[in-house]
Amino acid sequence: MSLKEVGVSSSLASFYVRAGWLVRLGRGAFMFPGDTLQIGLTTKFLARRLPGLHVGGKTALAWRGVRHNVGPFERLCLWGEQPASLPQWFTRRFPSDYVAWSLYDPDLPTGFGLQALPETPDGPAVSVPERALLELLSGVRMRQGLEEARNIMEGVRSPRMEVLGPLLKHCQRVKVVRLCVQWAEELNLSWAAEARKLAGVRGRGRWCGKLPDGSTLILKP
């Protein structure tokens, strides 16, 4: 809730800051002296300003129990609907990466695959494992290492096909869909055959892309 919503004007807020009763974090953002910002509630607050903001990708998988050697200083992975810059007061406290790629076509229902964690129902929206997996795979070749992504994906043992299916169907990025299906087959995951069926045919010929180490990632139809 903003200060304005509880009847505190900008001038009164400035007075409270000068008096030491509030600490100004940034434009329109304050905290009480001595308080510690919690990552979940603070992210939810930020989502009120950035449309579609949610915890996604590797962070969402880790928060939902799918992880591989997650270090103590992992950056927070946030996704949103439009390009934006996270405020410095937030990134200073919670080092983050923000992604605003359009993975899905407009026919995917708004908010599909986004839910608060069961243990924090009042917390921010977090991608369910199926959506988080595709978000993770979208970063391969760029900010996400290939080997780590494969290791994490191997931990996604029993995705709900009623959730993964629509995500694959509406995903606009051929690389993401093919990577999900091909790696599921290479890793002998039990859901590989059904994923291929649900994904359908995506383009013709091979998809090729250069990796940072100079090798080539080849994805078959």
Image (tube, rainbow, N blue to C red):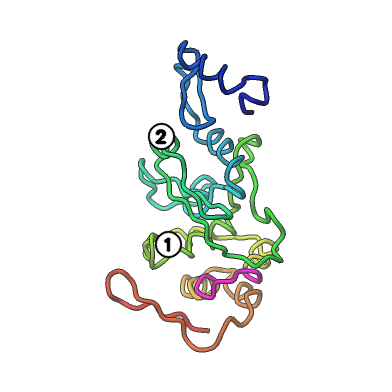
Is disc 1 in contact with disc 2, using a CB cutoff of under 8 Å? no
By secondary structure, the bulk of the magenta-drawn segment is best described as helix
* Callout 1 crowding tier (Cα within 10 Å): few <14, some 14–19, many ≥20: some
Residue at 55 percent across and 60 percent down: it is: 157
Label 2 element class: helix
Q: Look at the picture and state if 179 lies above or below 114.
A: below
Q: Tell which residue pokes out farthest to the top in this image.
A: 19
Residue at 35 percent across and 76 percent down: it is: 210
Give whichever of 16, 141 is nearer the camera: 16
Amino acid type indicated by mark 1: Ala
Residue 100 image position (x, y, % from top left):
52, 57
Instruction: Tell me the quarter of the picture where residue 215 sits.
Output: bottom left
Tag 1 residue: 149
**Disc number lying in front (1 or 2):** 2
Instruction: Verify whether residue 177 appears in magenta.
Output: no
Q: How many marks?
A: 2
* Callout 2 crowding tier (Cα within 10 Å): few <14, some 14–19, many ≥20: few
Quadrant of the snapshot with the N terminus: top right
Q: Look at the picture and state if 106 lies above or below 21.
A: below
For residue 190, side relative to residue 58 (left or right): right
Label 1 element class: helix
Residue 83 image position (x, y, % from top left):
51, 55
Give whichever of 77, 52 is nearer the camera: 52
Tag 2 residue: 93
Amino acid type indicated by mark 2: Arg
Residue 217 image position (x, y, % from top left):
38, 77
Q: Tell which residue pokes out farthest to the left in this image.
A: 213
Instruction: Verify whether residue 172 appears in magenta.
Output: yes
| Residue interval drawn in magenta | 168-176
Residue at 40 percent across and 46 percent down: it is: 75
